[in-house]
Amino acid sequence: MESSKTDVLIIGAGPVGLFAVFELGLFDMKCRLIDILDRPGGQCAELYPEKPIYDIPAWPSISAQGLVDKLMEQIAPFKPEFSFNRMVSGLEKLEDGTFRVTTDEDEVIEAKVVVIAAGGGSFQPKRPPIPDIEAYEGSSVFYSVRRMEEFRGHDLVIVGGGDSALDWTLNLQPVAKSVTLVHRRPEFRAAPDSVNKMYAMQEMKQLDFQVGQVTGLKGSDGQLSSATIKGPDGDVEIPCTRMLPFFGLTMKLGPIADWGLNLHENLIPVDTEKFETSVPGIFAVGDINWYPGKLKLILSGFHEVALMAQAAKKIVSPGERIVFQYTTSSSSLQKKLGVAD
Amino acid sequence: MTKLSFVAFDGTRFEVEAENGSTVMENAIRNAVPGIEAECGGACACATCHVYVDETWTDIVGEPEAMEEDMLDFAYDVRPNSRLSCQIKVRDELDGLVVQVPERQG
Ligand SMILES: Cc1cc2nc3c(=O)[nH]c(=O)nc-3n(C[C@H](O)[C@H](O)[C@H](O)COP(=O)(O)OP(=O)(O)OC[C@H]3O[C@@H](n4cnc5c(N)ncnc54)[C@H](O)[C@@H]3O)c2cc1C
Ligand code: FES
């Protein structure tokens, strides 16, 4: 078990979590961010990286990924630490008022303040709308590959047309007994190189590619025996014992519901002075919070973190006087930003 | 004004007057047509505004572009006349258009 300490632990590295690093950094607080995605940016990076946003102040138009890149540049002087591909699973307040945060990789982080910037919740694989699929999840149907060995000797059906589907088709082909890739059309959203490799292997009868959509599963006690594929020439039944559907990601509230915080329709109510939750020392900012008049806008999240940082400072450095300063004119802030002459 | 008809999964028909330049999805939401969710608000990023274009209208409405075709991979029971309604702009030629709402959105 790895263990570490930080001033502020930020759950979620979306645009609001990222800007929190800046506002907290101006008050000398060190930040650590944890996100289940493999990169920063939250919804902006995962859902609409190439789309222009038109309501970021002073940016008449900026792509969502462009905004994330700019935020990363802006917070770089504060040297935030990132842990990606990790889900925050546990959060508890200790007797001394600090917090113990745990991840699904069994890390433990101790923090003086916790900021929940979890947006719409953690990104998790989408469950395809196949009747009764729940009955097979965890035993025959998996949404990710933790260990390739688990697929050894199995008749495997992989569903989807993106890079994950193609990459795992190619990687698991040598391990599985048979691999059938199912996608609703012969065009893919994946790297052309992988697609060509897949077609070449199909040519050599090393795997099978079926155009169609999975409409049903057969089996018993969670053990899959076949999948029904509706294709252009009607239904085909493919015997299989494992299935890997790759239908992209969706946001689910996830473990946040278990942390003893008051919730309001899956959102965390906060006050509008400090953006603090029902537990002192835990703040919630961005899309995840709720207060009268709340708007799920990036610019609102930016405002929230500026106020939150003041309250957080009082917890991290009790008794220290907080001086309001402008970045344009304060030599001490400019030093922190690395722009002082 | 252009007339659009939505046929909900249970067969209920919704006839609406749509402004040219608006999207078919926006008109469904404005008129509370059941079964159109449009989680991403029309950014072609969610596939929860999936509709079937009535067979007599498919030629006039046209084919999805590549980005929409990619997003349709995430929809349920995709058919040759499937479209994402946020990607269909209302225009004069679409006067009388009929679209069906699928059983479920993803
Ligand atoms: C298509 C689309 C268009 C949009 N257009 C605009 C626009 O024009 N203007 C605008 O202002 N806003 C727009 N938005 C909304 C904007 O993207 C959100 O308001 C913004 O992303 C919220 O930022 P956030 O940091 O609060 O949360 P998010 O961006 O949702 O990030 C939260 C992060 O927290 C992570 N997380 C959650 N729980 C856990 C956990 N337990 N463990 C680990 N990680 C976790 C998630 O994986 C995620 O990466 C749009 C949204 C969409 C989908
Ligand atoms: S509303 Fe999301 S894709 Fe159309």
Image (tube, coloured by chain):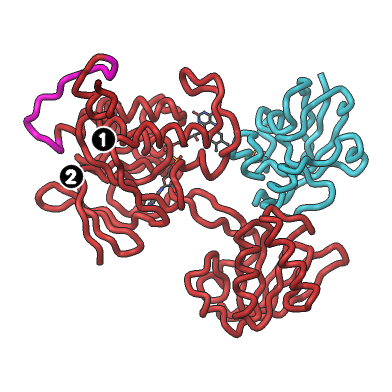
Quadrant in the picture for residue A4? bottom left
Which numbered dot is residue A276? 1
Q: Is mark 2 within 8 Å of ligand 1?
A: no
Q: Nearer the viewer, residue B5 or A70?
A: A70
> Which residue extends farthest top?
A329
**Where does the image place residue A114, in percent across and percent down from the top left?**
25, 44
Q: Secondary structure at mark 1?
A: loop
Q: Residues within 10 Å of mark 2 (few under 14, many from 20)?
A: many
Specify the chain shown as red.
A
* Chain-order first, disc 2 or disc 1: 2
Chain B colour as displayed? cyan
| Three-letter code for the amino acid on which mark 1 is drawn | Glu
Residue A264 versus residue B63: which sits nearer the camera? B63
Which of the 4 image quarters holds residue A13? Answer: top left
Q: Quadrant of the C terminus of chain A?
A: top left
Q: Which residues are magenta?
A: A315-328
> Which quarter of the image is occupied by the N terminus of chain A?
bottom left
Pointer 2: what residue?
A: A112
Chain that bears disc 1: A
SS class, disc 2? strand
- Is residue A219 visible in the rendered image? The answer is no
